[in-house]
Amino acid sequence: MNANVYLPALARIAGIEEETRGARAIKTFRIEFPEGGGFDHECGQCAMLSLFGKGEVMISIASAPAVKEYKQFSIMKSGRVTTALHDLDVGDVIGIRGPYGNQFPLDQWKGRNLIFVGGGVGLAPIWPVIQTAVANADDFGSITVFYGARSSSDIMYKADFEELARKAIVQLSVDGAEDGWKGYTGFVPANLMDKAPSPDNAIAITCGPPIMIKFVIQNLQKLGFADEQIYTTIENKMKCGVGKCGRCNVGKDYVCVKGPVYSWAELKTLPQEY
């Protein structure tokens, strides 16, 4: 990458996968760097994507660190820059700089059971952790993935989940009843309570809409998980990436510098501004 942290490198869109359609459309982009450029990253880190003439946006890196050929980003169409990104085609060039933020402490979790709880596009920030844990399954205990969406047509990574189900325990849910749906019907926090994973020797990692995270954490506590056993990410607060603009602060913390990954024991001491 460039020595100047504010100067993006050029990258090419190598692939686009349409995950969901409609008002909350999600596309997954695979980004390649020309001539082998780019950067390494850790699980939980983000990168700044820029589209010339439109602006830039901080997005979680959704590919595992072991994948060196490309960076993957799953992006919901929600604003000026993300809408412009959704209008791009394979072969188009964008700017990228990073990585930014801290990481999920996977090395500290070795030997523990891992429970992932995701909702909507919030699956993207924890997907690299899931992929890394599954690829190194001998280092961990059981791996369970809860994921929920509004409907079955809103589920991300459908083909990947089919593969994941052969390697981990997968618990999918949709918010409302659907003909032919064989998974859980109801919200993600309710599915979590229904399956009631044990807190013994376990770590829980969650990301999704803020209201989902709130109730997931409450339910994890009801199940006996200690604050130190619960992790989340507030990457939606990250702005410039280098702690200069001040827009990412939560109380005394600049999320770009201290976060975005926090244990609930750390995050609960900060003002509820996220």
Image (cartoon, rainbow, N blue to C red):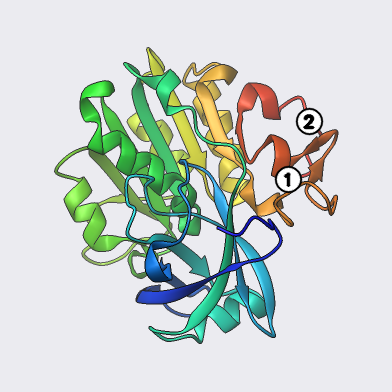
Q: Crowding at label 2, few (<14), some or many (≥20) Cα neighbours within 10 Å? A: few
Name the side, left or right, on which 45 lies relative to 140: right
Q: Crowding at label 1, few (<14), some or many (≥20) Cα neighbours within 10 Å? A: few
Residue at horizontal 44%, vertical 44%? 126
Residue 10's place in the image compared with 232, above or below, is: below
- Three-letter code, disc 1: Tyr
- At mark 1, the secondary structure is loop
Residue 63: image tag: none
Residue at image mark 1: 274
Residue at image mark 2: 270
The image shows residue 152 at horizontal and vertical percentages of: 33, 65
The image shows residue 102 at horizontal and vertical percentages of: 59, 37
Residue 90's place in the image compared with 217, above or below, is: below
Asked if the residue under mark 1 is in contact with the one under mark 2, i.e. CB atoms within 8 Å, the reply is yes
Residue 176's place in the image compared with 167, above or below, is: below
Quadrant of the rendered image containing residue 35: bottom left
- Three-letter code, disc 2: Leu
- At mark 2, the secondary structure is loop
The image shows residue 264 at horizontal and vertical percentages of: 62, 27
Tally of numbered tags: 2
Instruction: Locate the C terminus by quadrant.
Output: top right
Quadrant of the rendered image containing residue 194: top left
Residue at horizontal 48%, vertical 27%? 105
Residue 223's place in the image compared with 64, above or below, is: above
Residue at horizontal 69%, vertical 58%? 4
Asked whether the viewer can see residue 79, the reply is yes
Asked whether the viewer can see residue 187, the reply is no
Marks 2/1: CA distance? Answer: 10 Å
Residue at horizontal 36%, vertical 28%? 114
